[in-house]
Amino acid sequence: MKVGLLLFTACLTVGCAVFRPSVSEIELRSEPIPAMHESRQEEVLELYSTLISPPAKDVFMKAVHGYDHIPYKKKMLTIIDFSLPSTEKRAWIIDMDKGRVLFNTWVSHGVNSGENMAHTFSNTEGRRMSSLGFYLTAETYKGKHGRSLRLDGLERGFNDSARTRYIVIHGADYVSPEFIEKEGRLGRSWGCPAFPKPVTKPIIRKIKGGTVLYIYGDDPEYFDKSLYSLRK
C-alpha cells in the first residue's frame, strides 16, 4: 500500500485532518465502476430536480456516477459539457453538499478540437486539443494567465497526461460575450478549459485542492473504453 493511503487511514483512526494525496499517490482505476444502484439513482434525480439552470440530466447523471467513485474529494463538482457550442454557458460548478449551482458560465475548448463545437479530443502532448473525463483539481499558481489551477487526470489514456501537457484552468479575454458577438464563437485555448476572467478567481477559490471536474463530449471511444462510464 502506498504511503499516502497509509497516512489517510491513520488520520481516520486518530481523528487528525484529512490527508489528500496527490494523483501520483492514487492508483488509477483498473476495473470499471459498478452500475449505479437504483436507490442512488433516485437520490441523484431528486438532487437534480432542485438545481437551478442545471446541465443536461444525462450529463449530470454521468458526472455524479463517476464523482461517487472518486476518493479523497471535497463536495464540489465541476461539469463541462463540450457537446454544446462554445456560445452557450456550458460549465457548471455545483456544491454537492448544499445542492446548489454556484456558477454557470462559458468555457473554451482546445484550438484543434473544433471551431464553435468541440468534436475531436486527445491526451497527447502538442495536439492542442481538449481531453475528456474525470479530473481532480490540485494546487494554484500565478502564471502568464494570472491565477491558474493545475489539474490531474484520473483516466488512463484519456486525460492522465494533463499535468505534463500543462492542462490547467485559467482565465482568458477570449472567453467573453463580447468575443462571441464579434467572432460568432469563443476563442480557443491550447487544450485548457479557460473561463471568463471576471469569474476565474472566485471559481478557482471554490474548486481548488481536491474537487472533481468532469469534461463531457460526444466521443464514442470514451464511452466505450472509460472505466468511469455510466453502464446500465
Image (cartoon, grey):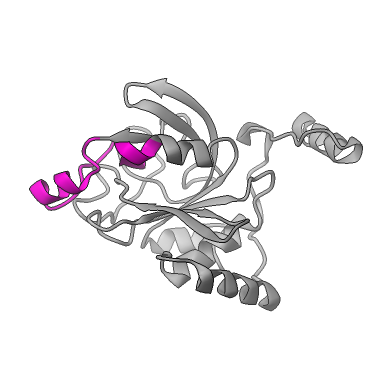
Residue stretch in magenta: 173-200
Taking depth in this image into account, of 224 and 112 the one nearest to the observer is 112
Q: Residue at x 52, y 59 (%)?
A: 100
Residue 6 pos. (x, y %)? 83, 34
Q: How many numbered tags mark residues here?
A: 0
Taking depth in this image into account, of 77 and 30 the one nearest to the observer is 77
Seen in the image, is 24 located left or right of residue 62?
right
Residue 107 pos. (x, y %)? 32, 47
Q: Is residue 189 magenta?
A: yes
**Residue 72's quadrant in the figure?**
top right
Q: Furthest residue to the right? A: 14
Q: Let me know if residue 152 appears in the view.
A: no
Q: Residue at x 63, y 56 (%)?
A: 97
Quadrant location, the C terminus: bottom right
Taking depth in this image into account, of 208 and 53 the one nearest to the observer is 53
Residue 28 pos. (x, y %)? 63, 44
Seen in the image, is 60 located left or right of residue 122?
right
Seen in the image, is 215 located left or right of residue 135?
left
Taking depth in this image into account, of 231 and 147 the one nearest to the observer is 147
Query: In the figure, 136 relative to 119: above or below?
Result: above
Residue 38 pos. (x, y %)? 67, 78
